[in-house]
């Protein structure tokens, strides 16, 4: 993550940032900086006589080129010698092409409707790597959505697909995106080729029972899930999960898979497990909810300073396997606004958010990349509002 260390004491840095959207914590500070792609949460930490600045966790969906620009500008504003930096002084924010989308852009721009307008068939690839297979799908005349979180992979794919057939590159976690950004029965084929097997932490694998249920809801009847892995135990788990679902039937070994990794593993003599599962039935209880672009909760707090002093980290479990952890609290002295730094975890992924508690009694999601609020997170916000109202 981009960061910089300045030879200037923490208090002097904070003094130079007065008037900015600055929130003070017990041992650190958090600054919200508005950019072209969203609002960037910047953490400031004391390091002896120096000050350390970095992008907060969970904000990697934003434009990293713009992150470099913002941190460089902050360093110039507060002064002090740069002791250590991972920043590129020549970095510039880039105007993304119309074929690129963040979750918010996806929803505001009509999402999948942009492709469905002129195409009956939509294929999806999660984790497209260098974009080679994604390019092949587009060249076959298919409308395609590629889902990735790697900036390097996204850049490669955008370059490969420039000027070619209908496609959208969506920067989001794969499981989350399929669950919350696609309408029911909207996908014809979904490809997951060589997902990371997490051998030491299998609970982090993408393909789990809840995700198989999500795929049953999002694929059209007759649609296919095509997977490939070189990991024997992961392949067994995948087959077991799909076999346990009444909605899918195994459809043999797909022949159309050809990727850089497949050729590499074959040249090394590794066994490759290629699988296809066909959707035969539609689940009876389908989830048609979509994320909110904004979600507000009224929960008046009369004395923010008292909340700040009494705060202890705590965890809510709004539903099922989900949990919502409130980790840290910050206070903007000028506006009397509280900021809560949180983690929301469900079976699909972990998301990090900042919540603002305004003096007027409104609990709001801070406008970072995560301006889309999945319904489980909305219910966690409601619980958080009740907790605040009881203080």
Image (cartoon, rainbow, N blue to C red):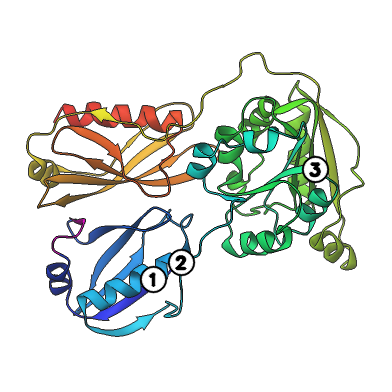
* Residues marked 1 and 2 touching at CB (< 8 Å): yes
Per the image, the residue denoted by label 1 is 69
Instruction: Give the quarter of the image for residue 158.
Output: bottom right
Q: Is residue 106 left or right of residue 363?
A: right
Q: Is residue 149 above or below residue 245?
A: below
Please tell me which residue is depicted at 58% across the width and 47% down the height of the picture.
204
The answer to if 22 sits in the magenta stretch is yes
Image label count: 3
- Quadrant including the C terminus: top left
Which comes before the other along the chain, label 3 or label 2?
2
Q: Name above or below for residue 82 compared with residue 111.
A: below
Q: Circle 1 sits in a helix, a strand or a loop, which is it?
A: helix
Q: Residues within 10 Å of mark 1 (few under 14, many from 20)?
A: some
Residues under labels 3 and 2: Cα distance?
A: 31 Å
Give whichever of discs 1 and 2 has the lower sequence position: 1
**Which dot marks residue 142?**
3
Query: Overall secondary structure of the magenta stretch?
Result: loop
* Residue at x-position 87% and y-position 68%: 268
Q: Position of residue 97 (x, y in %)?
A: 58, 56
Q: Magenta region: which residues?
A: 18-23
Q: Which residue is mark 2?
A: 93
Horizontal relation, residue 211 to residue 310: left or right: right
For the view shown, which residue lies furthest in the top direction? 284
């Amino acid at each position: 993550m981009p960061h910089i260390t300045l030879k200037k004491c923490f208090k002097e840095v904070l003094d130079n940032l007065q008037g900015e959207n600055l929130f003070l914590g017990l041992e650190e500070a958090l600054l919200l900086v508005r950019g072209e792609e969203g609002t960037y949460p910047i953490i400031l930490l004391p390091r002896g006589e120096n000050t350390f600045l970095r992008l907060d966790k969970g904000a990697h969906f934003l434009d990293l080129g713009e992150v470099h620009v913002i941190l460089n500008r902050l360093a110039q504003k507060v002064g002090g010698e740069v002791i250590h930096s991972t920043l590129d002084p020549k970095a510039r924010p880039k105007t993304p092409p119309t074929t690129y989308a963040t979750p918010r852009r996806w929803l505001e721009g009509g999402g999948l409707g942009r492709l469905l307008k002129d195409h009956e068939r939509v294929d999806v690839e999660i984790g497209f790597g260098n974009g080679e297979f994604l390019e092949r799908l587009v060249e076959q005349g298919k409308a395609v959505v590629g889902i990735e979180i790697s900036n390097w992979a996204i850049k490669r794919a955008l370059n490969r697909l420039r000027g070619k057939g209908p496609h959208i590159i969506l920067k989001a976690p794969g499981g989350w995106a399929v669950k919350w950004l696609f309408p029911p029965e909207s996908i014809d084929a979904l490809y997951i080729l060589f997902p990371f097997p997490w051998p030491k932490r299998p609970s982090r694998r993408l393909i789990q029972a809840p995700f198989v249920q999500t795929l049953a809801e999002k694929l059209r009847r007759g649609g296919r899930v095509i997977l490939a892995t070189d990991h024997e135990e992961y392949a067994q788990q995948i087959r077991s999960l799909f076999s346990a679902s009444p909605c899918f039937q195994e459809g043999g070994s797909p022949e159309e898979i050809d990727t850089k990794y497949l050729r590499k593993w074959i040249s090394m003599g590794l066994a490759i497990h290629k699988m296809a599962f066909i959707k035969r039935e539609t689940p009876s209880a389908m989830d048609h909810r979509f994320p909110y672009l904004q979600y507000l909760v009224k929960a008046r707090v009369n004395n923010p300073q008292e909340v700040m002093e009494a705060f202890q980290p705590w965890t809510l479990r709004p539903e099922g396997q989900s949990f919502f952890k409130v980790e840290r609290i910050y206070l903007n002295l000028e506006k009397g606004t509280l900021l809560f730094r949180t983690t929301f975890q469900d079976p699909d992924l972990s998301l990090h958010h900042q919540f603002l508690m305004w003096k007027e009694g409104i609990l709001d999601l801070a406008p970072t990349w995560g301006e889309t609020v999945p319904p489980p997170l909305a219910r966690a916000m409601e619980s958080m509002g009740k907790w605040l109202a009881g203080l």
